[in-house]
């Protein structure tokens, strides 16, 4: 029996989100190994033009559902469309990026279908019996739990951002275009406005200066240093939790995975949940006042000391 893998393709104003394409490429690898079929599911308004190019990233087929209300992510509308597609076509596996929207959508679908959801997997495969096996950092990140959902369909996972590269290895996909015909008056949520915060996609950044709680949540020195180094800024989760920085630039197992050449990590302890987001960085440099901080073990170079003393001196030097 052919293993039917679906990937929810996220788009923003018609531009396909890169990490969805990375998931497609990984799904295709799995499908080729197991004799499966990969379908990308793209919801939006006037997005059909983008569909054919999705094939080269690994989709055998793309189902496009067009409706004005699908132009922007809408919890109820997206869930309703996905629910009816899944009921009609019964995929074995459904994957999505662990973006805010992907997490919202698959969480809703997991409840609707009374099935499991592997959250924020950093790798996935399919075992001999056809079960989706997700690698989920667990117990504070000290272990990677290998999880499979043996009950319920579809088997579902959200995939951490930036863990799979989008590969342009395949050909054109078959495209099926459907009309949503949704009635906006049936939904509780009405769109009022779209707010853009303009956060940088740091999964693509070459250099990143990362602020941890050791900065006390004050990003002034971090920003100054980043500017001088031509780098973008990332943060550990507690800084996003306290609102010192947007969640989009949180690094780690529940945030973004970096692929940078350089990460300069300031005042972060090196918790496994954080470190999993910097494992693909070529050169890691840390500053920490604690010589026992685990972060130092994960660094190529480090300075032990107070960042509030070290950074101003470094900034002065770089300015000169
Ligand atoms: C399910 C789950 C998911 C999680 N996902 C993530 C995630 O995606 N990303 C993430 O980052 N975390 C995540 N966490 C939280 C994670 O476990 C850690 O709590 C977090 O990474 C710690 O952040 P931190 O290193 O900034 O802070 P701390 O652990 O408080 O470390 C602060 C560090 O700064 C140093 N320091 C203090 N003052 C100075 C100074 N003046 N100069 C130099 N150094 C100084 C200290 O020595 C210390 O090492 C997750 C946790 C759970 C349970």
Image (cartoon, grey):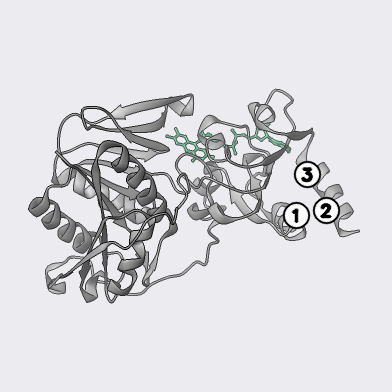
Give the alpha-carbon distance from disc 3 to disc 1, as whole Å: 12 Å
Task: Give percent across and percent down for residue 173.
Answer: 28, 61
Mark 2, residue position: 315
Name which of mark 2 and mark 3 comes first in the sequence. 3
Task: Confirm or deny contact between disc 1 and disc 2 (CB under 8 A).
Answer: yes
Does the closest atom of ligand 1 sit within 8 Å of the Cβ of label 3?
yes
Q: Residue furthest right?
A: 320
View quadrant of ligand 1 = top right
- Residue in the picture at 85% in, 55% down: 318
Q: Nearer the viewer, residue 162 or 76?
A: 162
Mark 3, residue position: 308
Please state, as top left, top right, bottom left or bottom right, where the N terminus lies in the image. Answer: top left
Identify the element where label 3 is drawn: helix
Task: Give percent across and percent down for residue 26.
Answer: 38, 45
Mark 1, residue position: 225
Give the alpha-carbon distance from disc 1 to disc 2, as whole Å: 6 Å
- Residue in the picture at 64% in, 54% down: 206
In the image, is residue 46 above or below residue 164?
below
Task: Indicate which label's residue lies in the foreground, 3 or 1.
Answer: 1
Graded by Cα atoms within 10 Å as few (under 14), some (14 to 19) or many (20 or more), the crowding at tag 3 reads few
């Amino acid at each position: 029996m052919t293993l039917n893998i679906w990937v929810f393709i996220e788009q923003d104003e018609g531009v396909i989100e890169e990490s969805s394409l990375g998931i497609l490429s990984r799904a295709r690898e799995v499908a080729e190994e197991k004799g499966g079929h990969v379908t990308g599911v793209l919801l939006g308004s006037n997005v059909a033009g983008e569909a054919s190019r999705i094939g080269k990233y690994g989709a055998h087929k793309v189902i496009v559902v067009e409706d004005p209300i699908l132009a922007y992510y809408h919890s109820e509308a997206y869930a309703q469309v996905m629910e009816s597609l899944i009921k009609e076509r019964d995929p074995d596996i459904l994957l999505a990026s662990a973006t805010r929207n992907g997490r919202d959508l698959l969480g809703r679908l997991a409840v609707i279908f009374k099935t499991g959801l592997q959250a924020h997997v950093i790798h996935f495969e399919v075992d001999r019996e056809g079960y989706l096996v997700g690698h989920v950092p667990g117990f504070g990140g000290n272990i990677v739990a290998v999880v499979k959902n043996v009950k319920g369909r579809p088997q579902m996972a959200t995939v951490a951002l930036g863990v799979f590269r989008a590969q342009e290895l395949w050909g054109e996909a078959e495209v099926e275009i459907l009309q949503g015909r949704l009635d906006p008056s049936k939904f509780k949520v009405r769109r009022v406005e779209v707010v853009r915060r303009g956060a940088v996609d740091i999964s693509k950044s070459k250099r990143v200066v990362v602020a941890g709680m050791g900065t006390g949540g004050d990003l002034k020195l971090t920003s100054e240093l980043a500017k001088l180094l031509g780098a973008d800024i990332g943060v550990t989760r507690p800084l996003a939790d306290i609102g010192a920085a947007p969640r989009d630039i949180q690094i780690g197992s529940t945030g973004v995975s970096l692929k940078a050449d350089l990460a300069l990590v300031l005042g972060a302890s090196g918790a496994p949940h954080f470190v999993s987001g910097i494992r693909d960085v070529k050169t890691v440099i840390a500053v920490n006042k604690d010589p026992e901080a685990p972060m130092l073990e994960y660094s190529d170079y480090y300075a032990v000391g107070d960042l509030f003393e070290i950074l101003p001196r470094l900034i002065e030097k770089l300015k000169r």
